[in-house]
């Protein structure tokens, strides 16, 4: 990996450390999630990075892909299992991090298990190890603790302005013999649950991402497409970032989806309604 690129990945990770330290104390009973989300995103910019995506707040049985909309009035309650997914990027080079807090409690077995499995997988990452070896470490720890990994979510590599690249690192055992190469940036992302171990799409969707240029009629749709390319650097964006009338925004987003110009990221819900925790960190394999 080019030394300049490595420095940008490391800077993004260092900034994410500070942002996480800033965020953790705000995850408390009575906090309104939109206020916390906007403070975290503002802090990221003040530290010299940009958000790689809207900060995610996925609560209890929701595993991922929830960011508050502008009118969101969700307040955190004692006992909520809150998953906070934070991305920081420097010139498009991403640090992908997530943690879980049980509001008002000192800990939770699901949280402890996801952290333990993630750290063990990160410790095992080195050039020449296979995807199957890393996935086996994760599943053995999670199942050994009496829980299930979420099998249709996975860790992943990244590249400039792209948050998901191969190889993927499943949370459950696999026959994938892909060899991890030196210089690969990898986000290990272990989801644990006391449910079935599968997620399904839910609603409403508040996160989208640029896919391609496409001819669209509405001026609002063209504006969103331009913002997605230039302002958001083709990374995921939140509906609350668009700053336009709600009805026209909804129509414009539908038009862009029909034209396959953008991709939607619906909330992902544990299909049996089980509680979910996650822990995620990024490592450059050197």
Image (spheres, rainbow, N blue to C red):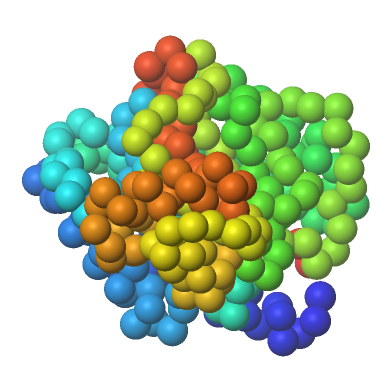
Viewer-nearest residue: 68 or 230: 230
Q: Residue at x 44, y 22 (%)?
A: 270
Judged left or right of residue 227, residue 6 is: right
Q: Could you tell me if residue 24 is visible in this image?
A: no
Position of residue 268 relative to residue 228, above or below, is: above
In this view, which residue lies farthest toward the front? 217
* x then y, percent, for residue 206: 37, 46
* x then y, percent, for residue 160: 68, 70
Viewer-nearest residue: 100 or 122: 100
Which quadrant holds the N terminus? bottom right
In this view, which residue lies farthest toward the left? 30
Position of residue 72 relative to residue 236, above or below, is: above
Q: Could you tell me if residue 50 is visible in this image?
A: yes
* x then y, percent, for residue 245: 24, 58
Judged left or right of residue 249, residue 90 is: right
Circle count? 0
Viewer-nearest residue: 193 or 73: 73
Q: Residue at x 56, y 38 (%)?
A: 190
Q: Residue at x 60, y 59 (%)?
A: 215
- Quadrant in the rendering for residue 171: top right
* x then y, percent, for residue 174: 79, 27
Q: Residue at x 74, y 30 (%)?
A: 136
- Quadrant in the rendering for residue 104: top left
Judged left or right of residue 256, residue 78 is: left
Which quadrant holds the C terminus? bottom right
């Amino acid at each position: 990996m080019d030394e300049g690129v490595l420095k940008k990945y490391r800077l993004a990770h260092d900034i994410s450390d500070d942002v996480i330290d800033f965020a953790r104390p705000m995850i408390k009973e009575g906090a309104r999630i939109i206020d916390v989300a906007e403070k975290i995103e503002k802090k990221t910019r003040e530290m010299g990075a940009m958000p790689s995506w809207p900060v995610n707040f996925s609560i209890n049985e929701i595993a991922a892909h929830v960011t508050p909309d502008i009118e969101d009035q969700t307040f955190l309650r004692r006992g909520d299992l809150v998953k906070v997914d934070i991305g920081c990027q420097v010139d498009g080079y991403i640090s992908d991090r997530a943690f879980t807090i049980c509001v008002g409690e000192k800990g939770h077995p699901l949280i402890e298990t996801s952290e333990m499995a993630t750290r063990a997988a990160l410790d095992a990452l080195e050039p020449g190890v296979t995807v199957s070896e890393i996935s086996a470490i994760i599943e053995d720890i999670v199942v050994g603790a009496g829980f299930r990994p979420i099998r249709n979510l996975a860790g992943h590599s990244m590249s400039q302005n792209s948050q998901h690249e191969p190889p993927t690192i499943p949370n459950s055992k696999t026959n994938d013999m892909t060899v991890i190469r030196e210089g690969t940036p990898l986000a290990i992302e272990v989801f644990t649950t006391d449910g079935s171990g599968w997620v399904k799409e839910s609603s409403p969707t508040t996160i989208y991402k640029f896919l391609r240029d496409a001819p669209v009629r509405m001026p609002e749709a063209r504006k969103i497409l331009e913002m997605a390319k230039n302002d958001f650097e083709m990374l995921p964006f939140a509906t609350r970032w668009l700053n336009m009338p709600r009805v026209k925004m909804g129509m414009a987003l539908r038009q862009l989806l029909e034209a396959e110009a953008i991709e939607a990221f619906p909330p992902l819900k544990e299909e049996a309604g089980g509680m979910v925790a996650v822990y995620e960190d990024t490592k450059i394999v050197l």
